[in-house]
Image: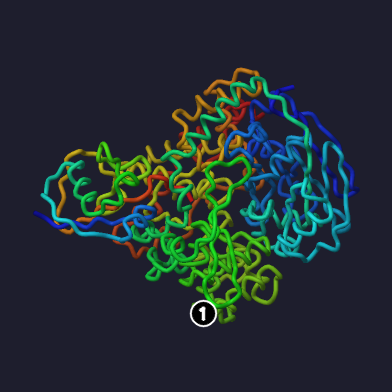
Amino acid sequence: MIKIKIEFFGRARLIADQEYIYIDIEKQIMEIDLIKIIASAKPALLGEVIDRKTFRLKKSYNFGINGIKNVNNDIMCLNNDDSILIFSSQSGG
Amino acid sequence: MLQGYNNKYLVINLNDHSFEINKIDNQILYDYIGGTGLSTYLLNKYSESNSNPLKPENPLIFCSSLLTGTRLTTTSKFAIATKSPLTNFIGDSMSSSHFSDKLKKTGFDALVIRGKSNKKILIQISNSNIEFLDASNLWGKTTSQTEFELKNKIGTKFSYACIGPAGENLVRFAGIKNDGGRMAARTGVGAVMGSKNLKAIAVGGNIEISIYNPKKINSIRKELSHKSLGESTEKYRTTGTTINMSLLNRLEMLPTNNFAESKFAKSEYIEGENLIKNHFDSKAHCANCTIGCEKIFVTNDNKNSTKSRLEFQTTASLGANIGISNPNTIIRAAKLCDELGMDTISTGVTIAWAIEASQKGHISNNIDISSESKLLKLINDIAYRRSLGNLLADGTKLAADNIGKKSSSYAMNVKGLEIPSYDPRNLPALALALSVSTKGACHNRASAYDIDFNNKNIYEDPKIIAKKTKLSEDTSAVIDSLIWCKFLRKSFDDFYLESSNIYSLITGEDFSENKMKLAGERINNLKKLFNINNGWKRSDDSLPERLLKNSNQKSQIISKNFLDSMINNYYHFREWDNNGNIPKNKLEALNII
């Protein structure tokens, strides 16, 4: 098991009412399983940031690993102390 | 005659308070669409090369567009074009809301203002009736005072665009304010208006525009309004853009202390999440907008309560970039800029430059903005050109040129226009777009940060970045010419297909996607041609030395060589020569000459 940080930005932070959380996961994990763990830790995100049916991020949000790099793979390979950033997919402003 | 347009424009000569009405050929409307495209065409038509932007010969052009007045969501927008007193190149700026609809309903697609009045005036236009009214009693008044008095004097059936004291005093980054909360803020369009002794424009038309297929347009209007309330606009609708700061700070892309750093230690106090929790007051919409991105914030200290619209660029430029972490101070500073009619980005970046110049001993003034009152005084001094404010009112480029001492190396502008608050050092598409943009450092003429945020895998490929940036710039020109709000852009499934279909349904003339794409390319080429005719040279397409040399970041992507490589590729995709000039055959192919 490894420990990673989940960081929330914008509306996701307001809904989670927290800037970040730490979760313990397997080093290799399916994206859907990771999101289920996040949803379990922060149920308020369900329906708002996380799609209730698919357990994917809603179109309004992006995932980034240690920055803004998009997560494209269903299977993620993470390291201890990695950060997952959840932020708006709308970059304008 | 094309349906959806008035097919004519008004030319006002302020030298003798005369006017003429000119027809617009269909071909011009096909080629330039409206908005920023048509205003660029008219600017080229009515400008003299190498003219002084603050002299009477510089025209000031207001343009509505095809979509204005159709009630399609987010289309109540207008464009302004002139020669910028900040850059000496093309200055174009956009604003929105009722003024655009009422301008179009006067019966004109554009308003070209030439010359200079010998007394302070305002222009009142209603249904092809033009009056020149005395504005001496309005001179010196703030933007909200001016609008308030005009509503009392002329009435609420009109909409007003006006300048504040900054425009009157020819502050080179003065804007033009309209409809209470909106401003065409960038490139100093307000200074040009002030140079003409023109305080305000009142428009109150009610001429309806004919639409070829109103039934289908109405159906599209409903569908698009529905889409605009979907996931692709959630941020704009719910939190607004102030939340950009927390992410950019986390990514070390938040310009701080005059771009010397990319992370602000006290950002948490002024991040959108904190503003929403502790300062949110209300939300506002432009006319005919279903998104409603405007968020109004209110102070919460024991001083006079102040409300101001805030968005990310304002909170960053008047916050992190000048080391301010008190949200109440930012709200008051933003409000003051609005009242004085001054661009918040240029104001903040210019103050940041002055602080550094003071610290380095390059100017003798000791700049102290440690208290709110001192910051507000400095902003007032700029607007009224008092003491140091007189130097700063010319913007960072001219101010640095004026004092020398290598202060231009930390004057954070491109072509004279101050850089918005995205740190381009690790955003390569944005770095390229800011460098080559014809109006200088504008983040909105290519929206290139969106390329960076969604294509991390292309970061080290200058060719792909250049190609994507060129295409994004052309799409932006079309968006700004039709005119849609850019916050709607991701609500389209196929932007060009849907927009060209709408064009055809309004005008009754077939307008293919390819014609629309070509129009975007043509508009950007004509903007570039304007700059070439006004002395542009390749070295103008660059970034300040600080962004290319100094880096506190471990993995800065942008270097001088990398930027040059992107620029070379960009010229290649534009089919320009190696020096960035437009070959004659390219201009002919685009029907520009």
Q: In the rendering, at what x and y percent does residue B537 appear?
A: 57, 48
Identify the image quadrant of the N terminus of chain A: bottom left
Looking at the image, can residue B407 be seen?
no
Amino acid type at mark 1: Ser
Q: Residue at x 71, y 70 (%)?
A: B384
Q: B12 left or right of B311? A: right
Quadrant of the rendered image containing residue A32? top left
Question: What colouring style does the render use?
Answer: rainbow
Mark 1 secondary-structure assignment: loop
Q: Residue at x 29, y 46 (%)?
A: A46
Q: In the rendering, at what x and y percent does residue B510 appear?
A: 60, 17
Q: Residue at x 80, y 46 (%)?
A: B114
Looking at the image, can residue B315 be seen?
yes
Q: Tell me if residue B522 comes above or below residue B544 in the rendering.
A: above
Q: Tell me if residue B350 comes above or below residue B534 in the rendering.
A: below
Q: In the rendering, at what x and y percent does residue B139 appear?
A: 80, 63
Q: B564 left or right of A64? A: right
Please tell me which residue lies in front, B225 or B521. Answer: B225
Please tell me which residue lies in front, B521 or B317. Answer: B317
Q: Residue at x 64, y 51 (%)?
A: B184
Please tell me which residue lies in front, B266 or B381. Answer: B266
- Say which residue label 1 marks: B370
Circle 1 Cα neighbour tier, 10 Å, few/some/many (<14 / 14–19 / ≥20):
few
The answer for which chain carries disc 1 is B
Q: In the rendering, at what x and y percent does residue B357 appear?
A: 53, 74
